[in-house]
Amino acid sequence: MKKLLKIVLSVFMAMALAIQLPVNLVSIVNAEEVNSSVVSDFEYYLNDDGEIVITGYNGSETDITIPSKIEGYNVVEIGERAFEYSDLTSVTIENGITTIGKMAFYACDNLTSVTLPSGLTTISDGAFADTGLTSVTIPDSVTTLGKEVFLECYSLTSVVIGSGVTTIGNSTFFECFNLTSVNIPEGVTSIGSYAFYLCHSLTSLTIPSSVTTIGDYAFFGCNSLVSLTIPSSVEEIGEDAFADLVVLYVYDNSYASQYAIDNNYNYVTIEDTSLDETYAQDDDIIVEDHGLYYSIYTILSEEDKTVELTSYYNTESGDYVGGLTESVVLSSTVEEYTVVSIADGAFDLCGDIQEITIPACITNIEDGAFSMYFHPQVFYVYSGSAALQYVIDNNFNYVIIDADSDNEENTYDQSTIYTSEDGNYMYTILDDGTIEIYIYNGDEANVVIPSTIDGYTVTSIDEYAFEYCSTLVSVVIPNTVTTIEHAAFFGCENLTSVTIPNSVTYIGGYAFAYCTKLTSITIPSSVTSIGEYAFVSDIQVDDYENIESVTYIITIYAVEGSYAAKYASDNGITLEYITDEEDDSTSTVSSVQTGDESQLVAYVLLGGIALVGAYYTRKRKYN
């Protein structure tokens, strides 16, 4: 829209008012007041109070500052859809602007950074939905945070919400798959429906005591949020509000405790467990302050100088330890005493501890020391110890430390998780003596999965083994693997190349879902089964979780008549045919192993051309 001289503008505005036409014009910029090279690119109008509302942007700059004044008029609002679908990469909003309108920055895919002013009061519905933001700080001045504000912000990892917000709206963080850190400030009373729906990476969250309402599906699909404490202030919780396997920590006789019972959630009933000052006065009690948590011990014998670990929890609130630490190594001694026992219920108030190491000196662990519903994912135990027998009896995952390979107790079963000699892989041994990769611990960009690990043949890649591995760019799967399980490579956002050998027969649902840079893949004729949405890049659902649309950006290369070709055709995926000869030359990996301290060399055979890459092993933590 061309800029008009002031005198012409004023006449036109008067004429527009006379014939009741809307005024939505671009004003010429007074170069003496503002930088015209920036401000002249904005479209805007004057509201009834004589203040500017920005309605659009015509500039070419991608790193911009939105000014607080134009032509001497105060800018107070960024209007509805003002910047939608723009190529902006960074936005700074000057102080004085109080409102960001609905969908103001919607679908700005390249927008990774926004600076919000301290006087901002309103962020309207969908304002930053479907953008590339990675982190956001919402100032304390904001009192209105609309619904769907950060919906489908797949790159968003952390959000700081200011103290002025009282409501987390519906779908505010819907499908923010990589969100790992967010606070809910004291003063928030309501968490809306679908507020954190499918936030897979969220591992810890504190719900303040001001919250009274939690909406439908608010935390549904937050599968990494393995425990959550619901304050006694909560009076209403909607349908399927939490992930299926979460453990709810609820107060006795509270609404949440009855909700957990009625909806078959795993739960632990808690009371006020703040550290009692009488502990310090009790000669039989020893309190070990670790800064983040307490360990409380009871003296068993003064003569033998032995103690029992009776409780382990947060120093701040007496609440569960979850979110404070992922790895715990229990002390073998405290003061002059040896720890020989762990009491019933000692770890009832422990949150998402990922792994725990139990010293060999502990000779007794009571049956209820660790909850059957919530316990560390992996126990590190010593060969021949009481802890080893305890984890076997309770079917917990474990790794043997300093195990003697000739020891009969060093047996393999599918509840045992082992760590490879190089530290890159955790795995389980299957009934046939082959292994399944349980999780990938490395950080390499280009990964060649070994055909053997510690002398065992790799035949399967487990569910979620490489999930959200953001460093992964390419992966070569060896020709010993037959199975790629559900969501094995889910959300590997930088993955661009995958080599599937002609040994693979099964690819699970969502196996490569949301690998948004993976635009092509060759699937050999050996594959006879592929699960639903194995290669999907996006799924849109309505408020009732009904699928509205499914997007595929990938092209499947397959032999005509093969299962993969039919799968592509049935699901509307772009398909390119390859010859039988091309199918037979699917890349394979020769004799790549781990467990040897020497340098190994991986040979990837691509159409007869040998590409040689160095592959080094590292010592694992315990060997």
Image (spheres, rainbow, N blue to C red):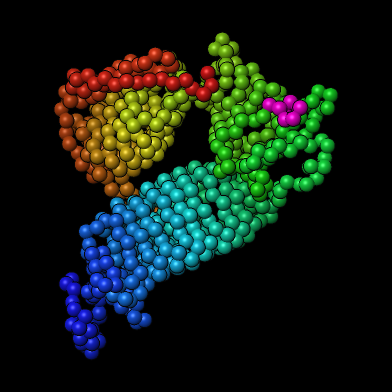
- Can the viewer see residue 615 in this picture? yes
Main SS, magenta residues: strand
Q: Nearer the viewer, residue 607 or 535?
A: 607
Q: Which residue occupies 26% across, 72% down? A: 32
Q: Nearer the viewer, residue 220 or 100?
A: 100
Q: Residue 300 in the image: state x and y as whole percent.
A: 80, 29
Q: Which residues are magenta?
A: 332-339
Question: Residue 402's quadrant in the figure?
Answer: top right
Question: Residue 113 at what x, y percent from top left?
Answer: 36, 53
| 337, 426: nearer the viewer | 337
Picture residue at 53% right of the left edge, 46% below the top: 204
Pick the quarter of the image with the N terminus: bottom left
Give the percent coordinates (x, y) of residue 584. 21, 22
Q: Is residue 263 above or below residue 481?
A: below
Horizontal side of residue 245 vs 284, given as left or right: left
**Numbered circles on residues, count:** 0
* 276 drawn magenta: no
